[in-house]
Amino acid sequence: ALALELGSLSILPPSLEVRPGDSPEQVLAKVFRAEVQALEEALRGLNGEAFRRAAELLLQARRIGVFGVGSSVPVALDAYYRFLRIGLNVFMAPETHMQAVVASLMGPEDVGFFVSHTGRSRELLDSVREAHRAGAKIVALTSFSHSPLVDRATVALIAPVRETTFRV
């Protein structure tokens, strides 16, 4: 499954690899070009129908809980801020134990928006299980179509993006 997932992504060209001897200007240009390539790959991988369904669920939700752990937290925090700015009733807990508690308090009118690059983070999956048990709908944002997160999702947004060392 991993080989299939990785096979769908282009390999970062050697010209975009950041090397120790690169000047600051070269690093800047390489990082920007790699990010543009990552966005294009994500756009090609996203399913328009799944995106429409996710948007409908989010707009119809009584409350939206945004969840992420580890390196997915900045993406989740950005989603939280953007949902908040457009007037959606959104919340986000800062710590994994708190996330599991708030997920357990969600209901059938609520949506959990779960962000995970791999879709396999144990702490995040604990919150997914709690939200699922509570009857909440699950919107997943991940890079891998075969994962426990996708298996539990009402709607999965698959944005296949390769992790690079300088992105981390």
Image (cartoon, rainbow, N blue to C red):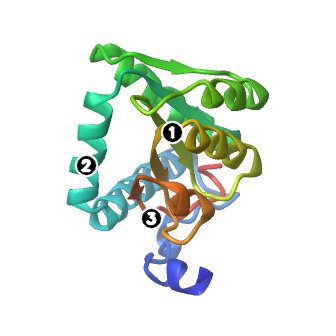
Q: Nearer the viewer, residue 11 or 101?
A: 101
Residue ID for mark 2: 53
Labels 2, 1: front one: 1
Q: Position of residue 137 (x, y in %)?
A: 44, 42
Going by the numbered disc 2, the residue's amino acid type is Arg
Judge left or right: residue 101 versus residue 73.
Answer: right
Going by the numbered disc 3, the residue's amino acid type is Pro
Residue appearing at x 65%, y 39% in the figure = 130
Categorize mark 3 by other alpha carbons within 10 Å: few (<14), some (14-19), many (20+). many
Q: Position of residue 107 (x, y in %)?
A: 49, 29
Marker disc for residue 135: 1
Marker disc for residue 4: none
Residue appearing at x 71%, y 41% in the figure = 70
Residue ID for mark 3: 160
Q: Position of residue 158 (x, y in %)?
A: 41, 60
Judge left or right: residue 17 versus residue 71.
Answer: left
Q: Total label count?
A: 3
Residue appearing at x 64%, y 24% in the figure = 102
Judge left or right: residue 3 versus residue 87.
Answer: right
Q: Earlier in the sequence, mark 2 or mark 3?
A: 2
Labels 3, 1: front one: 1
Going by the numbered disc 1, the residue's amino acid type is Gly
